Amino acid sequence: MRKQTQAYLFAAGAVLCWSTVASAFKLTLRETDPITMLLYASLFSAAFLLAVRFGRKRKRGDGATRGAAWRRSAAGGFLNPFLYYVVLFRAYDLLPAQEAQPLNYTWPIMLVLLSAPLLGQRIRPLGFAAILVSFLGVFVISTHGNLRELRFTNGPGALLALGSSAIWALYWLRNVKDPRDDAEKLAWNFVFGAAYVLALHLALGMDFRISLRGLLGCLYIGLFEMGLAFLFWLRALRLSETSAKVSNIVFLSPFLSLFLIRTVVGERILPSSVAGLALIVLGIWIQRRS
């Protein structure tokens, strides 16, 4: 099989994983609270990623600066999975999945906004147009299309969903400066992240008990959203002739997700959610063209 064909298959696998997670989040949150869900999901993910990491041949130089590597992992794990998923799961707890998922999908626009002050990159005029189009989509979703009154259906939830996209963008900008192998970084980030979530869970005095359905939901989220999807995507990027050839497939994910939210979760999809998502995706496409 040609390498590019393999790249498309791995990219499709990542998209399918990402398309299911909004439904998995909402269904699992019916069984438990956001922090407990994150605790078990991150533990499952950390165990899975460590198994993958130690099952692979170690690259020369992996242990050259062990102290610096631990510090990077500790800081990276705080951003993702700890802070990112604490904020994201709370957003899903407050919002319908059809609203939380598209708002979280604005991270490529956040990446552009944060790249200017953090990396010194200049935003071109077309880039500003892309940002405006995407944030118009945000307002359409958050107000259910009622742009005249600008009355948000759940302001805190919308801010949390947008905040999670900013945290995600910040995490990946920070990753640019980390020279380690991607699988290495991901595995140890999740080990530290799981430790932070456990500490928070203990500090809040929360109950560790969870239903079997809730535990199975956490297992699914940990393996597919936090584990396999990342590995599939990294593999697709390595095999593809150019990143653009597989990156366009990602645009299918939010629309597939809406279909699953309707059929699996049972939410009635509002026209404003579809229109807002289309504007967000259009803005991301314009930004990539710029």
Image (cartoon, rainbow, N blue to C red):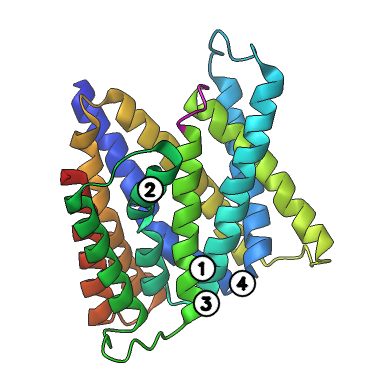
Instruction: Tell me the tag on residue 31.
Output: 4
Which one is earlier in the sequence, the residue at label 4 or at label 2? 4
Q: SS of the residue at dot 1?
A: helix
Q: Is residue 283 magenta?
A: no
**Residue type beneath disc 1:** Leu
Q: Which residue is mark 2?
A: 111
Q: Residue at x 33, y 24 (%)?
A: 238
Q: Looking at the image, is 72 positioned above or below residue 255?
A: above
Q: Residue at x 27, y 47 (%)?
A: 123
Q: Looking at the image, is 246 positioned above or below residue 141?
A: above
Q: Which residue is mark 3?
A: 156
Q: Is residue 24 visible?
A: no
Which one is earlier in the sequence, the residue at label 3 or at label 2? 2
Which one is earlier in the sequence, the residue at label 1 or at label 2? 2
Crowding near pointer 2: few (<14 within 10 Å), some, many (20+)?
A: some
Q: Which residue is mark 1?
A: 160
Crowding near pointer 3: few (<14 within 10 Å), some, many (20+)?
A: some
Circles 3 and 1 in contact, beta carbons < 8 Å: yes
Q: Nearer the viewer, mark 3 or mark 4?
A: 3
Circles 1 and 4 in contact, beta carbons < 8 Å: no
| Range of residues picked out in magenta | 176-180
Between the C-alphas of marks 3 and 1, the distance is 6 Å
- Using residue 163 as the reference point, say whether residue 205 is left or right of it: right
Q: Residue at x 22, y 65 (%)?
A: 133
**Residue type beneath disc 4:** Glu
- Towards the viewer: 266 or 174: 174
**Residue type beneath disc 2:** Leu
Which one is earlier in the sequence, the residue at label 3 or at label 4? 4
Q: Nearer the viewer, mark 1 or mark 2?
A: 2
Most common secondary structure along the magenta stretch: loop
